[in-house]
Amino acid sequence: MASLQQTATLSLQSNLFPSGRAASRNPLSVTIPSSPRRRGARGIRMSATVATSYAIALVDLAKANNTLESTSADVEKIEKIFSEKQIHEFFVNPTIDIEKKREMVDEICKSSALQPLTGNFLNILIDAKRVDVVKDIVKEFEEVYNKMTNTEMAVVSSVVNLESEHLAQIAKQVQKLTGAKNVRIKTVIDPSLVAGFTIRYGKWGSKLIDMSVKKQLEEIAAQLDLGDVQLAV
């Protein structure tokens, strides 16, 4: 088996694709580890390295094509698309023909209005058998993009969709707390919160503002110390 120190070069060039697929005028080469599939701690670190390399390559290519903002919007769409279990399992299934996966990418690009550059990038992941790290690539891309544009990412979880004016108020508050030039809000529906909402921001969501009823109930239960109380039946 190849050593973990061995590397392979990935070239994001449009001539990797048959005629009819969109071309990119700015080929980009990045160096990525060639043996990233080992399990355990080393395997996890290697997977992160691969995801980072692909993410940086996509950011650089988007910058070169002056499509950074639209590519960022595409990456958000990709995150939602690949969060669907059936789609993710389809693309990571080694028994499914690569051409069928390419056809599926074409359908996704049309239905989700993705740029040709983004579709080409997904096809590169298919060819390299690296679709399994697409979710990690999304996270790394967001990290690079946010640093580059001085943007703070805030994930707002709630039981129901919040009104746009409420999200705008949350964005302003996060901006005050972080001093970031820009704030991007990502919404998540979480029925377990009962009511209210939570806000995660900071590096890898390290900071939390919890305004949920679930949190309030947990605090009440802790104060009452209900653990040893047995209710009569």
Image: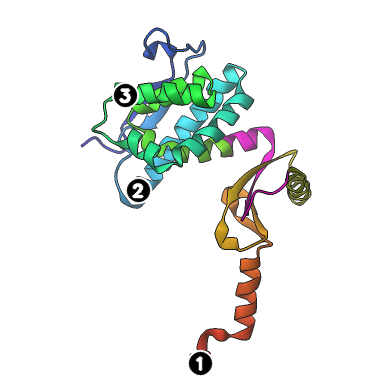
Quarter of the picture containing the N terminus is top left
- Residue named by callout 2: 42
Along the line of sight, the residue nearer the viewer: 207 or 191: 191
* Amino acid of disc 2: Arg
User: In the image, which residues are magenta?
Assistant: 143-163
Determine if the magenta segment contains residue 2. no
Q: Secondary structure at mark 2?
A: helix
Disc 2 crowd rating (10 Å Cα; few below 14, some 14-19, many 20+) is: few
Residue 142, image x, y percentages = 57, 37
Determine if the magenta segment contains residue 149. yes
Evaluate whether residue 29 shows in this view: no
- Residue named by callout 3: 100
* Amino acid of disc 1: Ala
Q: Residue at x 38, y 25 (%)?
A: 104
Residue 28, image x, y percentages = 47, 19
From mark 2 to mark 3, how far is it between C-alphas?
32 Å
When asked about the image quadrant of residue 89, the answer is top left
In this image, 18 relative to 115: left or right? Answer: left
In this image, 211 relative to 86: left or right? Answer: right
Residue 56, image x, y percentages = 51, 30
